[in-house]
Amino acid sequence: MEEDILSLLFYCIPAAITGAVAYYFFKQYSENEDSKRKHLIKTELNKQALPTRLQAYERFSIFLERIKPSKLMLRVTPNGSSKEEYESLLITNIEQEFDHNLAQQIYVSDDCWSIISTAKNATVQMIRKSTISEKVDSAEKLREVILTDMMDKRAPSDAGLSFIKEEIARLFN
């Protein structure tokens, strides 16, 4: 009886080892195939999403260019002589541009969106700060002060444009 049990063990141990090795290799093969399938799906999704992402970056680039004070002042001219009305007109124009592109934020990184929002807010603050200046008493003087200030420093939107260019470069590397 003991010999039968021992003989049975000698037959079962190699079968168990072979089964364990077969299970291990099958599991590895399945995981590898799963990984390949996920990679192919991700690659295909990226191919389809890339044009949409690039379009979002393009639209934000246009937005940042349009809110550059030098370009904004050329495009949006004062309706009257009131500096407050002109300030309101400029800020309304910036907010409308921003709202028009709001949905594009889902296609860019959180960092990029944050920088774009910051550039917009900094531009608005710059306009407000120039309006409360004592040397500004009319809409034309407000235009002049803002344009003069921009000769000495970079526009807030320049940082956003630089970041967008870097992020696009990372997409293709």
Image: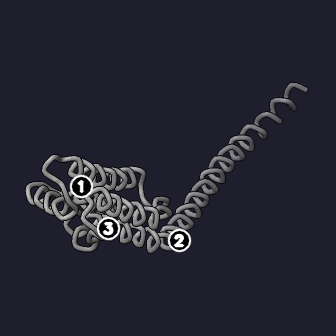
The residue singled out by tag 1 in the image is: 156
Element on which disc 2 rests: helix
CB within 8 Å, label 3 to label 1: no
When the figure is inspected, residue 64 is found, relative to residue 55, above or below; the finding is: above
Residue found at the far left of this picture: 152
Disc ID at residue 44: 2
Residue that appears at 40% across and 71% down: 54
Name the mark nearer the viewer: 2 or 1. Answer: 1
Camera-side residue: 119 or 141?
A: 141
Does label 3 or label 1 sit earlier along the sequence? 3
The residue singled out by tag 3 in the image is: 61
* Quadrant where the image shows the C terminus: bottom left
Q: Quick one: label 2, few (<14), some, or many (20+) residues within 10 Å?
A: few
Rendering coords of residue 74 (x, y %): 22, 73
Does label 2 or label 1 sit earlier along the sequence? 2
Disc ID at residue 13: none
Q: Distance between the residues labelled 3 and 1?
A: 13 Å
* Quadrant where the image shows the N terminus: top right
Q: Which of the 4 image quadrants contains residue 58?
A: bottom left
Rendering coords of residue 26 (x, y %): 66, 53
Q: How far apart are marks 2 and 1 (CA)?
A: 36 Å
- Res. 169 in view: no
Q: Which colour scheme is used?
A: one colour
Q: Distance between the residues labelled 2 and 3?
A: 26 Å
Residue that appears at 32% across and 62% down: 90
Q: What residue type is labelled 1?
A: Pro
Element on which disc 1 rests: helix
Residue that appears at 34% across and 63% down: 89
Rendering coords of residue 68 (x, y %): 24, 64
